[in-house]
Amino acid sequence: MPQKIKPTATQKRNFFIHLIVFLIASAIMWLTYDKGVEGWAYPWPAWITAAWGLSLIGHWCAVYTSFEDPGHEEFIRQTKNG
């Protein structure tokens, strides 16, 4: 059974930087998107927030739900030997 790989401090730090930048950028976009518009304004930040949010979920999965590949060493050995 593959073992879960514990994330390194660098991986955790990079994820939290990604999260903080996402939160700040999303807040700025949502606070400024309809300034000066009377009536309904198209919520364009929704597309950016959704796409960036999905990439953030993928980043979280890559950092916190990684498992070792038991056949990786064998694959590396075979690629070196041709």
Image: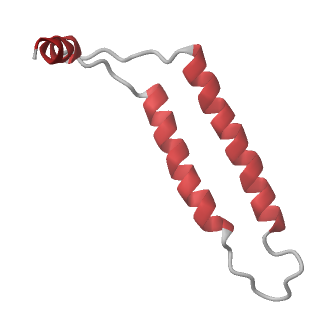
Q: Which residue appears farthest toward the right when viewing the image?
A: 36
- In the picture, measured across the screen, residue 1 lies left or right of residue 26, that is left
The quarter of the picture where residue 32 lies is bottom right
Q: Position of residue 36 (x, y in %)?
A: 89, 80
Q: Position of residue 69 (x, y in %)?
A: 25, 19
The quarter of the picture where residue 15 lies is top right
Between 81 and 38, the residue placed more toward the observer is 81
Question: How has the structure been colored for display?
Answer: secondary structure
- In the picture, measured across the screen, residue 45 lies left or right of residue 12, that is right
Residue drawn at (78%, 70%) of the image: 33
The quadrant the C terminus occupies is: top left
- In the picture, measured across the screen, residue 47 lies left or right of residue 58, that is right
Q: Position of residue 50 (x, y in %)?
A: 56, 59
Q: Is residue 43 above or below residue 56?
A: below
Q: Position of residue 13 (x, y in %)?
A: 64, 23
Residue drawn at (51%, 35%) of the image: 60
Tell me, yes or no, if residue 1 can be seen here. no
The quarter of the picture where residue 68 lies is top left
Q: Is residue 4 above or below residue 52?
A: above
Q: Is residue 56 above or below residue 66?
A: below
Tell me, yes or no, if residue 70 can be seen here. yes
The quadrant the N terminus occupies is: top left
Count of numbered labels shown in the rendering:
0
Q: Is residue 19 above or below residue 26?
A: above
Residue drawn at (81%, 75%) of the image: 34
